[in-house]
Amino acid sequence: MTIGGNGDMAQTLFLIIALTVLALPARAADIAGTWQADGKPQRVLKIQKARAGYRGEFYNLGDEAPGAPRFDSVSAITLSGDNVHFSLDKAEGTFDGTLSADAKTLSGSWKMLYGPPSQQITFARTAPKDAWVTDASPHKVQFVTVQPGVKLEVLDWGGSGPPLIFLSGLGNSGHTFADNYDDQTQAWANNELFDWPFGEKAVKDAGGDELTLVPGSSPSS
């Protein structure tokens, strides 16, 4: 058996290395970070690494509506190849999309139980300096068990002294007016009260402007 010169050996070694590299599985992209989708409403998805895959936090920066809270957790975000899937923990929202080749966008279909059957949406990876403000009034979120099987979501601004408790109504969560709660804490500390006008005369007396709607003529056909 005859072994060729150094040139042949180098060429053979290069071929072996090339085949070995091609046989290795491609390294999966890292999707951890902040992703934003511009539109009405604006949506923010913050993805963190978990023990098995990813988890995240979802923010709806528009007005809260039934089935679409301002904040929701995402226990599991799956990445299979370039396919990405996640569902909100509390609301009936599901995303199925594709990660772009440059790993800068997530494009796919957004589905809600209440609303359009599906909506095309694109999340763009965002640098921290360009991230939208998701919490203009920083607070912590926790769940308090009030009886077996029943938990209340509590937003806590911290501090000390007697607590000031706000109860949101009309089926909204505490996130609906969260940006304005701390505006009232100093007034509360000073024992100031804000009157709530009730009745037509009281509302007119407290109002600054009055809008009158007058029936108009129907457009000609």
Image (spheres, rainbow, N blue to C red):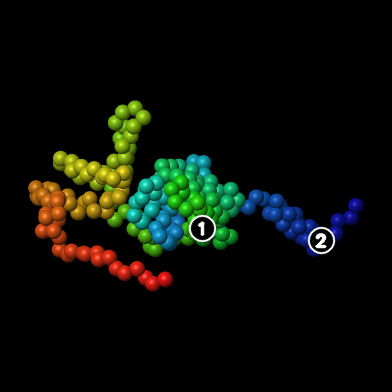
The C terminus appears in which quarter of the rendering? bottom left
Kind of residue sitting beneath label 1: Gln
**Which residue is at the front of the view, 52 or 100?**
100
Asked which secondary structure carries label 1, the reply is strand
Q: Residue drawn at (14%, 51%), measured in percent from left and top? A: 199
Residue lying at the far top of the rendered structure: 148
One can see residue 85 in this view: yes
Q: Residue drawn at (39%, 52%), measured in percent from left and top? A: 59
- Pointer 1: residues within 10 angstroms few (<14), some, or many (20+)? few
Q: Report the mark closest to the observer, 1 or 2.
A: 1
Q: Is residue 190 left or right of residue 82?
A: left
Label 1 sits on residue: 120
**Which residue is at the front of the view, 112 or 141?**
112
* Residue 139 against residue 143 in the figure, above or below: below
Q: Which mark is residue 8?
A: 2
One can see residue 206 in this view: no
Asked which secondary structure carries label 2, the reply is helix
Kind of residue sitting beneath label 2: Asp
Whether the residues at callouts 1 and 2 have beta carbons within 8 Å, the answer is no
